Image (tube, rainbow, N blue to C red):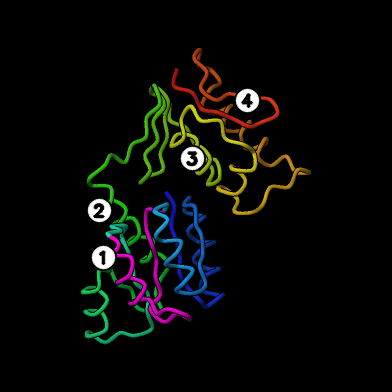
Amino acid sequence: MKILVVEDEKKVAKFLKQGLEEERYAVDVASDGLQGETLALSGEYDLIILDIFLPKKDGIVVLKGIRSKQLKTPVLMLTAKSAVEDRVEGLDSGADDYLSKPFAFAELVARVRSLLRRGAAEKSTILKILDLQLDTVTHKAKRADKAIELTGKEYALLEYLMRNVNRVLTRTILSEHIWNYNFDTGTNVVDVYVNHLRSKIDDGFEKKLLFTVRGIGYVLKDE
């Protein structure tokens, strides 16, 4: 699942990004409210973590703006304020949950999981391609009755491939989505991870799912 963090404090943003990626989420960071609102309205995210005190547009204004556009993505508000009236303002503006700074990262992750489960209530959390299944909340994968152990990047790669079944994904697209950087033609990191993933989901099975499209990229097929 993909999370947008809107936070102008660089240390906090880096801490959140690193910690959430270790929990196997794909994470984008916006450093001001204007950029955050633009990214949020793209509709690409399963959850938004939004600080209140932001340059250009404060978090409450951003929240009201995205809710006015009927964006229903769950929003977890962050703030240094702890007064009841401030929490009420955030919740009344459309926030789904509220966390005051400083906070324990374990609590933030628990709230993230809770909001993602709640947001997934109207849709299945299970991605399924033939006999391959991936739970986007627990991050557990299996093929047939065989459990598949995945690293954080392998999970992110598999989820993205499964959400784009039968679509050829270039190395550039995979690099930008999974690693959040522009593709360097001199690196083979995408190929290495695809090969690791292929060995886990295809080895030992007669029906192969993950294919290489020479000179272009990779595709996960359900046919």
Looking at the image, residue 216 lies above or below residue 35 = above
State the image coordinates of residue 100 (x, y, percent, origin top left). 35, 78
Mark pair 2, 1: CA separation: 10 Å
Disc 3 residue crowd, few under 14, some 14–19, many 20+, Cα 10 Å = some
In terms of depth relative to the viewer, which is nearer, 192 or 186? 186
Q: Residues within 10 Å of mark 1 (few under 14, many from 20)?
A: some
Secondary structure beneath disc 2?
Answer: helix
Q: Is residue 203 above or below residue 189?
A: above
Where residue 103 sits, quadrant-wise, is bottom left
- Dot 1 corresponds to which residue? 96
Q: Quadrant of the C terminus?
A: top left
Tag 2–tag 1 contact (CB < 8 Å): yes
What's the mark number on residue 160?
3
**Does the magenta-highlighted stretch encompass residue 156?**
no
Whichever of labels 4 and 3 marks the residue nearer the N terminus, that label is 3
Q: Position of residue 124 (x, y in %)?
A: 28, 39
Q: CA distance from mark 2 to mark 3?
A: 21 Å
Which of the numbered marks, if any, corresponds to residue 78? none
Residue 108: x and y, percent? 37, 66
Tell me if 18 is positioned left or right of 92 in this view.
right
- Stretch in magenta: 45-69
Q: Amino acid at mark 2?
A: Arg
Q: Which residue is mark 2?
A: 118
Q: CA distance from mark 1 to mark 4?
A: 41 Å
What's the mark number on residue 212?
Answer: 4
Judging depth in this view, the residue of 191 and 18 nearest the camera is 191
